[in-house]
Image (cartoon, grey):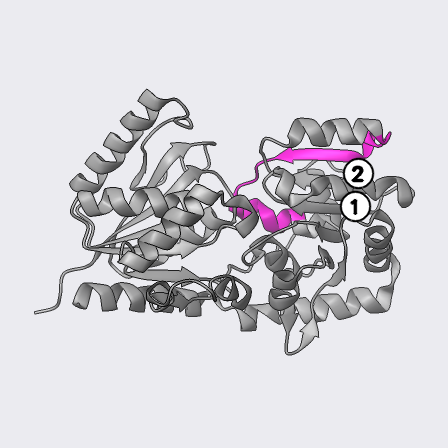
């Protein structure tokens, strides 16, 4: 007699189309295809990106910022976990880990997996301390890290924390679009003939999208398309106005996953000035889809934007407008570099196959439910 299908609860903080949410969405789809019982639970609903999907629940419709709202959210998370009765809870992001783990334990969950997908610069001292304590004392059964860079962040953590760590590199879906550049730009009402750079990212100060706006006065005629939503939009709009380039910055709003490849097809160069990442999924997806990428010169992006020892992007310090603009000009006008970047980027699919990530998460669930 075969073992019953595992019941898995994936927990995220906010529902939106961002990198961590894209990973859990892919895991949910893969687990469901394998016959697992899968539920995606979000602390709160930021956008409509998960509305209508099967087995998705929100513990609150907006961020529970006041004490009474926060207590109601915790009660809803506890009640939801009790009702689902998961064999394994898989949490994502720092607050997802440190809030979901103790609540899930109280609700009777036997196995808990934490995912360290939040950049260190985003995590406050209280969350860092809580995470370290939970990991060392067994609040998590396993702790997943997604790159060598992220793994090294925990090198000085307690031994009992590090013993629970496993590394599962992000895999990703091929988002290559079949549309021509003209068709892709028409779909977003973007300029048809001008050179176009762009990025898909949450509009948050850590993403440093103002650094992409700052290059526009330095490269005549180019336009910038920004896909995403978030609290930094007013500041970015003001930056564009102050630099006199507001008419060359196009805010596309949040895009569903199936339209990200269409954005890549519309661009002449994908720019990624982010100050901190644990992986940089958006840049890897763009490079693999054939868009020349210019990225901020930080260690984790040099690690993941590399295939067979060859860089799949041009790197420059995003906070140096002259250097960042020079790298973008190379990606826009140097035909030899453009061809090299496109060929190297295509090989990232072999380095980070989606199947490998899914098989690793499946094996992890099987191991924990067999224990």
Tag 2 residue: 191
How crowded pointer 2 is (Cα within 10 Å; few <14, some 14-19, many 20+) is rated as some
Q: Look at the image and say whether residue 94 sits in the magenta stretch.
A: no
Query: What residue appears at the point 69 percent right and 71 percent down from the top-left corner?
Result: 344
How many labels, in total? 2
Residue 340 placement (x, y as % from top left): 77, 70
Tag 1 residue: 196
Q: Secondary structure at mark 2?
A: loop
Q: Is residue 254 left or right of residue 133?
A: right
Query: What residue appears at the point 56 percent right and 48 percent down from the top-left corner?
Result: 121
Asked whether residue 180 is in view, the answer is no
Cβ–Cβ under 8 Å for marks 2 and 1: yes
Residue 172 placement (x, y as % from top left): 51, 60
- The mark found on residue 359 in the picture is none
Asked whether residue 153 is in view, the answer is yes
Residue most extreme to the bottom: 308
């Amino acid at each position: 007699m075969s073992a019953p299908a595992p019941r898995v609860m994936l927990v995220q903080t906010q529902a939106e189309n961002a990198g961590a949410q894209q990973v859990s969405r892919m895991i949910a789809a893969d687990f469901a295809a394998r016959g697992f019982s899968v539920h995606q639970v979000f602390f709160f609903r930021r956008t409509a990106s998960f509305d209508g999907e099967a087995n998705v629940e929100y513990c609150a419709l907006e961020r529970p910022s006041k004490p009474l709202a926060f207590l109601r959210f915790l009660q809803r998370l506890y009640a939801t976990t009790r009702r689902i009765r998961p064999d394994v809870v898989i949490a994502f992001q720092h607050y997802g880990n440190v809030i979901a783990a103790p609540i899930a334990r109280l609700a009777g969950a036997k196995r808990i997996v934490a995912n360290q997908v939040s950049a260190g610069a985003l995590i406050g001292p209280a969350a860092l301390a809580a995470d370290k304590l939970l990991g060392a004392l067994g609040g998590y059964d396993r702790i997943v890290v997604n790159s060598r860079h992220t793994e090294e962040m925990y090198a000085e953590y307690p031994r009992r924390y590090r013993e629970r760590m496993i590394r599962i590199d992000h895999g990703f879906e091929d988002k290559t679009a079949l549309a021509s550049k003209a068709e892709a730009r028409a779909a977003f009402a973007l300029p048809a003939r001008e050179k176009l750079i762009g990025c898909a990212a949450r509009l948050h100060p850590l993403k440093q999208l103002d650094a992409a706006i700052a290059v526009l006065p330095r490269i005549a005629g180019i336009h910038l398309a920004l896909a995403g939503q978030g609290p930094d939009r007013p500041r970015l709009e003001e930056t564009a106005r102050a630099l006199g380039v507001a008419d060359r910055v196009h805010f596309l709003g949040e895009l569903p996953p199936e339209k990200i490849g269409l954005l890549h097809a519309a661009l002449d160069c994908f720019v990624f000035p982010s100050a901190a990442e644990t992986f940089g999924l958006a840049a890897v997806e763009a490079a693999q889809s054939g868009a020349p990428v210019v990225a901020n010169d930080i260690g984790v992006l040099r690690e993941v934007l590399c295939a067979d020892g060859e860089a799949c992007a041009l790197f420059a310090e995003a906070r140096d407008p002259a250097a960042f603009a020079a790298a973008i000009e190379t990606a826009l006008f140097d035909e030899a570099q453009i061809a090299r970047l496109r060929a190297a980027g295509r090989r990232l699919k072999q380095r980070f196959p989606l199947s490998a990530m899914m098989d690793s998460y499946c094996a992890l669930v099987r191991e924990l439910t067999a224990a």
